[in-house]
Every structure is written in structure tokens, then in C-alpha cells.
Image (spheres, rainbow, N blue to C red):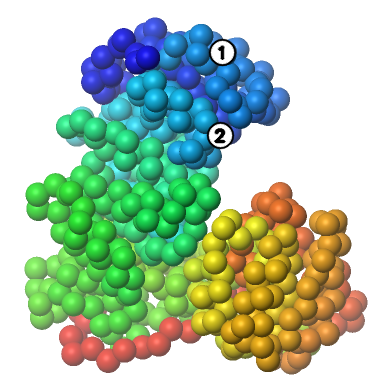
């Protein structure tokens, strides 16, 4: 079964979408944005979801969409009877999901929200009569921070820019914003990129610039294999027009760029913490510089900021500096002046649960990096805080944590293991770091977990030590989210602090990034 509508004709907000039969899978914030957009376009919309928040369930009939709530473990009759022309799936629906498999077997067009947003991107135009440019940002870690950094740099440079996508603001909401934007800075997950990779045609999504920040094991259960995960991430570079930004320290991202099918004239721009080449951004004697976006790049460089300036704003953890360089490359590709980038960095602050200091008590610093939900992210945290008392564990999502423990485990002071997947962690420590004290917190009750973690850590840590929550795992086995996990950790720390103990709290961040010698003289602005 396949739809009868000519979908190639539907590549504008002003095309005739009336009567298009669209089934929307999932009713999260993304699913609702899809349904709302299609209803506004006068399409016939059926939303199918296993659950529905009261607010969305009330709103769907108001906007003219139907709702089916029930099990999607098998293809529901309501979907078959609806005979959709298109199915738009929320990112949570994996390729092997039975409904997704049925849609593909039936030859029904299968879109994600990005495909729909790209097709209707001309709803609100810029002053020159063109839609907003798109910048795509992905990677195993650092996506949200880099998206926020890039948007703030663009705004400082006078552009109307919106961070959106996987960051929490649906792309379709940004596309339909009546104020309009010059640039949409879109955080894209591997799930969204997989759906995007299914699309064909001359008018497929074509970003102005794109970046994959890094690549490591993650979401293997969703994709089925690391190779499939890698291929999805690599699609971020497809059809890029101006700049493919890649991480020189991560060979996988360079190979992605080399293999990408891009628009003629698109440039490859590298970044890392070392000396930059003539088409790179990097560090020279403690100065972050651009050698990519200036005519004299073979002999000169433009100063962006310094590690000293970043230290004043608690932004010198090595992985944060790498994110800054990636964001600066994207902003520079759009013509933002280095001085404006420096201005943006002076007011930028990391989000909560990203190497966030909860308190310093008796010389012990308690750090919440609950956003480190995979081994790659946790490795960055451990590199920033060698010798920490490490709180680790949760739902490992099928990822092997052994390599992380082999690389970083011997350097920690002790480890406190939480979560449903404790055995792989304790076994890896027994193999790779048998001399490190290992403590397990075995609790089914969420309320008790962090109190016991803090009590155990307080018995281990001494003056000058760091207690680091960097779980390297998802949170949903015991907590509502990584934010809930971080909040509970912070509350447990605060509850443990003696009333008369001198404390320091605040948005302190990790520091430390090595400087490199560079034969190129930075040009100061």
C-alpha cells in the first residue's frame, strides 16, 4: 500500500496540503508540533501514541486532529484503516519498531519532523525573501552546549538565531515563529538523522554548515549496531553547502566529511585543542584562533578569545573548549566577527548538570555531571577531574563500559556504583583496576539512592578531593531524567552538609586545558 498524493509537490508552506492523510507516531513535544503544523496546513491528521499528556489530549480535537491511544506493540487497526499517505514518526521510534517496519513494508512515505520542517521552511521569510539558513549540530556528546554557543555567537553578531531541534524546542515551532529568524541552529540526534537519511530528491535538506563533534558508542539498542549509529551521525554532512566542521582529534568525523556528498565548493574546517592548520581553528599559546575564515590563513590567524578569559567564566574544561571552537567555526562560516564571538562567551553559562559544582565543603568539591549519560561523556569529565571519587552507573543502553574503565579507572580514588547495570562496571574494575575501592549502592527505592551515595563518598573523600557524579549511563532505570538524577544528588549533598560547616556554592566549572606552541602569530582584534 502506498499513498496516492504526489509528495514532490509538497515542498512549500504554500503548497496544497489539504486532505493529505498523515499518521503521526508519538505525542511528545515533537509529535504535537508535527500534528499542530499539519492541522494548520489542513491535512487530515491521526496521532497514534501509547500515552498522552492531558494537555495534548485536550488540544488535539481543538486543532482538528484525531487521537488513538493504545498499544503500538503491533500495528493498530486504526492505522491500517486510516490508509495514510505519509507517516511522520517521533524520534523515539526505532527502525526495528513493528509499526515502522510495517510502514516501510507498505511503501508508505516515512518522515521525521526535520523533513516536514524543511519542506515548510518558507512560511516566514527573511528580508531578502529567502527562508532562514539551517546549521546542523550532532555528536555523541556536546550537542546542546555547542548549539547554545553557536546561537549566542550569532545573536551577538546581529543575526536573529534560534537554537532548536533536539535541544527541546521543536524545529517546526521555530519555522512557524511569526517573528522569523535568519538562522536556525538545529541540534539533531542520531534518531532524527536516521529518518532524514530515508529521504530522496533534489530538494532534500541542505544545511548551510554542519558539524559532528565526536563519535563514540551510544544508542546501540536503537540503531542495532555501532556501524548503523555511525552512518546516521555521518548523514549530518550530506548536502552541506558552505562548511563541514569536524573534530581533528576524532578521526571518525574527518572520515565522515571525506565520504559525504556535499554541494560543490563546500569546505572542510577542522578544530581541536592543538595548533591549527590553514583551514582550522585551534589554540596558539593559550589563544583560541581562527585560521580558516580569513584570506591570509596560511600566514596569519584571528584571535577569538583566550584560555585566561574563558577561565574567568569557568569555561576551560577541555571538552568545553572544544565545543567553543566548533561553535566559533560555525559562527565564522556565517560571517560573525571574532570580537562578537568573544562578547558572546563573556556572558555564556553552561546548563545545569554539566560539570556543575554543587558545593565545596571541608575542601571536598561535589560535582554534578549527570548529563554524562554515556562513556564518552564520562571520559571527558574524568579527564577534567583526575583522582576523583567517581559515582557511576544506571542503564548502560547496551554499551560496553570496559574501555572507559580500562582507560580512566586506574586513576580514580574510588568508585561508587549505582543503577540496574552494576555488574558490568564492577567486573570491569576487577579486570582493569583491581586496586581501586569499589562500593555498590543497591537500592530499588529512588529516594534512598543518592543519600547512600553521598554518605559513602563522604566516608572516602578528603580535603582536596572531588566527588564526581558522571554516570556514563542513562537515568531512566531509577530516575525520571538525568536532571532528576542531578537534582537528587545535589539535594543529598546539601542535606549531608553539617549546619556549621563552611561551604562554597555556585556555578563553578572545571578548568584546565594545555597550551601549545604555535609558529603562527595570532592577529588580535
Residue visible at 58% across and 18% down?
76
Q: Give the secondary structure at mark 2.
A: helix
**Residue 29 - label:** 2
Vertical relation: 347 (above or below) 454: above
Residue visible at 82% across and 78% down?
456
Percent x, y of residue 278:
15, 74
Vertical relation: 374 (above or below) 164: below
Vertical relation: 478 (above or below) 18: below
Residue visible at 54% across and 81% down?
406
Percent x, y of residue 511:
51, 81
**Crowding at mark 2 (Cα within 10 Å: few <14, some 14-19, many 20+):** few
Q: Give the secondary structure at mark 1.
A: helix
Vertical relation: 192 (above or below) 220: above
Q: Image quarter for residue 325? A: bottom left
**Residue 78 - label:** 1
Percent x, y of residue 430:
66, 82
In front: 188, or 120? 188
Of tags 1 and 2, the one toward the viewer is: 1
Amino acid at each position: 500500500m502506498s499513498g496516492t498524493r504526489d509528495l514532490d509537490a509538497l515542498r512549500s508552506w504554500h503548497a496544497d496540503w489539504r486532505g493529505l492523510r498523515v499518521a503521526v507516531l508519538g505525542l511528545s513535544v515533537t509529535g504535537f508540533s508535527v500534528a499542530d503544523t499539519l492541522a494548520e496546513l489542513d491535512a487530515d491528521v491521526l496521532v497514534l501514541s501509547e500515552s498522552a499528556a492531558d494537555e495534548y489530549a485536550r488540544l488535539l480535537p481543538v486543532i482538528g486532529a484525531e487521537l488513538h491511544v493504545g498499544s503500538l506493540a503491533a500495528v493498530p487497526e486504526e492505522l491500517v484503516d486510516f490508509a495514510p499517505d505519509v507517516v511522520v514518526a517521533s524520534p523515539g521510534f526505532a527502525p526495528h519498531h513493528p509499526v515502522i517496519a510495517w510502514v516501510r513494508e507498505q511503501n508508505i512515505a516515512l518522515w521525521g519532523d526535520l523533513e516536514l520542517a524543511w519542506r515548510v521552511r518558507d512560511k516566514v521569510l527573511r528580508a531578502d525573501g529567502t527562508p532562514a539558513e539551517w546549521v546542523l549540530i550532532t555528536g555523541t556528546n556536546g550537542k546542546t552546549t555547542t548549539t547554545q554557543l553557536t546561537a549566542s555567537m550569532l545573536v551577538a553578531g546581529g543575526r536573529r538565531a534560534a537554537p532548536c531541534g533536539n535541544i527541546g524546542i521543536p524545529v517546526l515551532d521555530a519555522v512557524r515563529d511569526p517573528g522569523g529568524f535568519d538562522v536556525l541552529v538545529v541540534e539533531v540526534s542520531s534518531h532524527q538523522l536516521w529518518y532524514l537519511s530515508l529521504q530522496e530528491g533534489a530538494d532534500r535538506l541542505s544545511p548551510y554548515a554542519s558539524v559532528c563533534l565526536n563519535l563514540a558508542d551510544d544508542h546501540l539498542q536503537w540503531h542495532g549496531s555501532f556501524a548503523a549509529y555511525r552512518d546516521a551521525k555521518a548523514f549530518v554532512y550530506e548536502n552541506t553547502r558552505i562548511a563541514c566542521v569536524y573534530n581533528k582529534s576524532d578521526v571518525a568525523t574527518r572520515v565522515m566529511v571525506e565520504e559525504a556528498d556535499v554541494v560543490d565548493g563546500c569546505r572542510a574546517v577542522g578544530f581541536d585543542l592543538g595548533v591549527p592548520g590553514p583551514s582550522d581553528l585551534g589554540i596558539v599559546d593559550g589563544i583560541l584562533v581562527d585560521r580558516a575564515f580569513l584570506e591570509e590563513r596560511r600566514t596569519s590567524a584571528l584571535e577569538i578569545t583566550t584560555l585566561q578569559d574563558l577561565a574567568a567564566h569557568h569555561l576551560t574544561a577541555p571538552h568545553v573548549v572544544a565545543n567553543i571552537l566548533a561553535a566559533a567555526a560555525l559562527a565564522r562560516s556565517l560571517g560573525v566577527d571574532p570580537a562578537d564571538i568573544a562578547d558572546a562567551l563573556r556572558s555564556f553559562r553552561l546548563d545545569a548538570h554539566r560539570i556543575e559544582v554543587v558545593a565545596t565543603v571541608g575542601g571536598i568539591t561535589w560535582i554534578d555531571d549527570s548529563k554524562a549519560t554515556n562513556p564518552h561523556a564520562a571520559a571527558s569529565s574524568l579527564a577534567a577531574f583526575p583522582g576523583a571519587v567517581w559515582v557511576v552507573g544506571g542503564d548502560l543502553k547496551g554499551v560496553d563500559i570496559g574501555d572507559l574503565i580500562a582507560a580512566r579507572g586506574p586513576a580514580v580514588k574510588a568508585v561508587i556504583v549505582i543503577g540496574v547495570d552494576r555488574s558490568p562496571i564492577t567486573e570491569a574494575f576487577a579486570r582493569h583496576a583491581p586496586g581501586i575501592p569499589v562500593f555498590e549502592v543497591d537500592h530499588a527505592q529512588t529516594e534512598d539512592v543518592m543519600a547512600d551515595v553521598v554518605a559513602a563518598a563522604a566516608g572516602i573523600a578528603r580535603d582536596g578531593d572531588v566527588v564526581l557524579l558522571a554516570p556514563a549511563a542513562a537515568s531512566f532505570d531509577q530516575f525520571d531524567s538525568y536532571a532528576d538524577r542531578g537534582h537528587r544528588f545535589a539535594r543529598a549533598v546539601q542535606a549531608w552538609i553539617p549546619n556549621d560547616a563552611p561551604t562554597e556554592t555556585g556555578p563553578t566549572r572545571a578548568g584546565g586545558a594545555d597550551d601549545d606552541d604555535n609558529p603562527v602569530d595570532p592577529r588580535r582584534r
